[in-house]
Image (cartoon, rainbow, N blue to C red):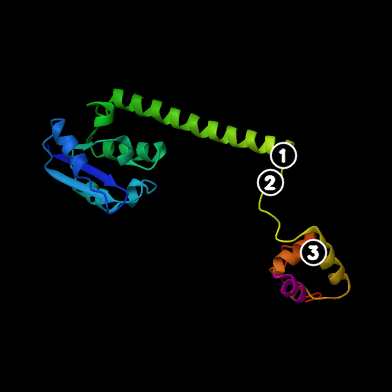
Amino acid sequence: MAVFGYGRVSTAEQTADNQRLEIERAGYAVEYWFSDVVSGKAHASQRAQFSDMLAKLRKNDVVVVSKLDRLGRDAPDVLVTIKTLAGLGVEVVVLQLGKLDLTSPAGKLMLTMLAAVAEMERDLIVERTQAGLARAKAEGKVLGRPSKTTPEQRKAMAQGYANKQSVSALAKLYGVSRATVLTVVRPSQSGDTTNKTHQ
């Protein structure tokens, strides 16, 4: 059985040394140390040092990290990582959660609860966003990207197009793309920029 320590920092200005020290102070004699300098948004599988560690792990080895987010970018990624390590017969310890083997029945229960909390948080964010959009709409606020043209410009574009001005000429005149002009003069066909009429 070997003890593997893993750390992660987000920038090159940071160091994972404190994470290793925290693991060793918790009583683990780290025989193999791996650390990545990578954003927390990166999946565990996208981390070079983490992948190297996976290749060296054997059954009954122990992987110790200081915090849960070292094992993945979010709850689903952490769960995949834990499942992968469990499949290798590796014990996983996160100091943040106490000296609990996350591949054990109690550890799996803890992870399930954490995943449920994460999912609830995501649902609440969606709910709040939708409520905010509905409130803004009720208050008469225009949602989405601001228009690149004024109502007067759109009216003039439509008139120019009716008077046989080409889409390209109108785009140049108003400093917008041909696609923008098409959404004004031919909204029902704005997705079709290959039509040669008036071009």
Q: CA distance from mark 1 to mark 3?
A: 25 Å
Mark 2 residue type:
Leu
Find out whether the residues at labels 1 and 3 contact each other: C-beta distance under 8 Å. no
Range of residues picked out in magenta? 169-175
Q: Nearer the viewer, residue 9 or 34?
A: 9
| Residue 10 coordinates in the image, percent (x, y) | 32, 49
Which residue sits at x=24%, y=40%? 88
Q: CA distance from mark 2 to mark 3?
A: 20 Å
Q: Which residue is mark 3?
A: 153
Q: Which residue is mark 2?
A: 143
The answer to whether residue 87 is seen in the rendering is yes
Q: Quadrant of residue 6?
A: top left
Q: Quadrant of residue 87?
A: top left
Q: Earlier in the sequence, mark 1 or mark 2?
A: 1
Q: Earlier in the sequence, mark 2 or mark 3?
A: 2
Q: Quadrant of residue 107?
A: top left
Position of 163 compared to 23: left or right?
right
Q: Which residue is mark 1?
A: 137
Find out whether the residues at labels 1 and 2 contact each other: C-beta distance under 8 Å. yes
Q: Is residue 105 magenta?
A: no
